[in-house]
Amino acid sequence: MFRTFRFRTSPYFFSSYNRPLCSNISANHPTKEAVISSAAPLLHDQTPSIPPPNPTTTKTSTFLKLGLFGTLTGAAITAGYATYAYTAEEIDEKTKALRASANYTVGDDKSSLDKFQALLYSASMTVPAKAIELYLDLRRSIEEQVQGFTEPSSEKLLPDLHPMEQHAFTLVLDLNETLVHSDWKRERGWRTFKRPGVDAFLEHLAQFYEIVVYSDEPSMYVDPVIERLDQKGCIRYRLSRNATKYQHGKHYRDLSKLNRDPSRVLYVSGHALESSLQPENCVPVKPWKLEADDTALLDLIPFLEYVARHRPGDIRKVLASYQGHDIATEFIERSKEHQRRMLEQRQQGRLRLR
């Protein structure tokens, strides 16, 4: 019913069909190696070329950098020397003419050439003038900040005396190794000890003096020590570290800031000459380092009482006469000598009357 058909495929058909197909692919699509090799020159042509550095430009840049560095270095050295050698006020006075030259002008009746020269001169002086003004402003600002740490907290550390006390003398006392001594041991830590005779010393002299404690310790140390030391309120004022003047790495007592007549101020300290800026007001005593038989404060009472009762015109002249001597011991010797002379005068007077 059904017929079977055989179809004979001729080899020529496949060969003739495939040949043009292969040739078309080869013609329109190059091989991978051909694409890469043909693209290589294209990529090479697109890479930007970097020109070699210009020697002239490099030398100019180096010269400008060196010039700028030299200018800044010279300005820094000049500013440092000026800061060391002169105060801000002296520099301000010396540079007034230079800074005024930045505003140099000529009258309208001058020629155009003169006006142009004046303009060039003013422009050339503007930069140094502005630099000096900037330096002065910066230096004053820094000095104000530093002054807050190095100068006493106030120009008047004590309030004004009452009019009825204008004749009174002021007795300034150091704290450590003068009234007390602080000692540390590992088993008990810090402890503060009262100097022998300190209670009698304060209580007796409070009748004659305005007593002030002036210490270089912080107030957090000074206040509790004095509160326990001065149970009877003999000490009128207390000054701590913020009232000292800091210089050369040390805190100094500046008695000129006490708001008191310097001719009526005595400063008693175990380190008086090393801790005060006014050695002429100092009464040195032996520093106390826990000696049980110490009597330095009690020995000083007669001299201080004598001063308060006789009120010399200038205590600094009195203290100058004791220079190089222990004041307490020398005062006793002078007192004995004075009594001896008085006794001799009395005896001579009696003989004359006979």
Image (spheres, rainbow, N blue to C red):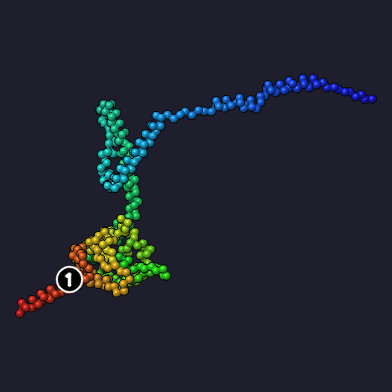
Q: Is residue 76 visible?
A: yes
Q: Quadrant of residue 330?
A: bottom left
Which residue corresponds to the image point at 10% horizontal and 74% vertical from the top-left?
A: 345
**Quarter the N terminus occupies:** top right
Which x, y percent locates residue 298? 26, 73
Which residue corresponds to the image point at 17% horizontal and 74% vertical from the top-left?
A: 336
Whether 135 is drawn above or below 287: the answer is: above
Which residue corresponds to the image point at 33% horizontal and 43% vertical from the top-left?
A: 76
Which x, y percent locates residue 60? 38, 31
In-image side of 47 versus 277 (left or right): right
Q: Is residue 163 visible?
A: no
| Residue 121 or residue 250, whichever sits in front | 250
How many discs mark residues in the rendered view? 1
Which residue corresponds to the image point at 38% horizontal and 63% vertical from the top-left?
A: 220
Q: Amino acid at mark 1?
A: Arg
Q: Which residue position holds label 1? A: 334
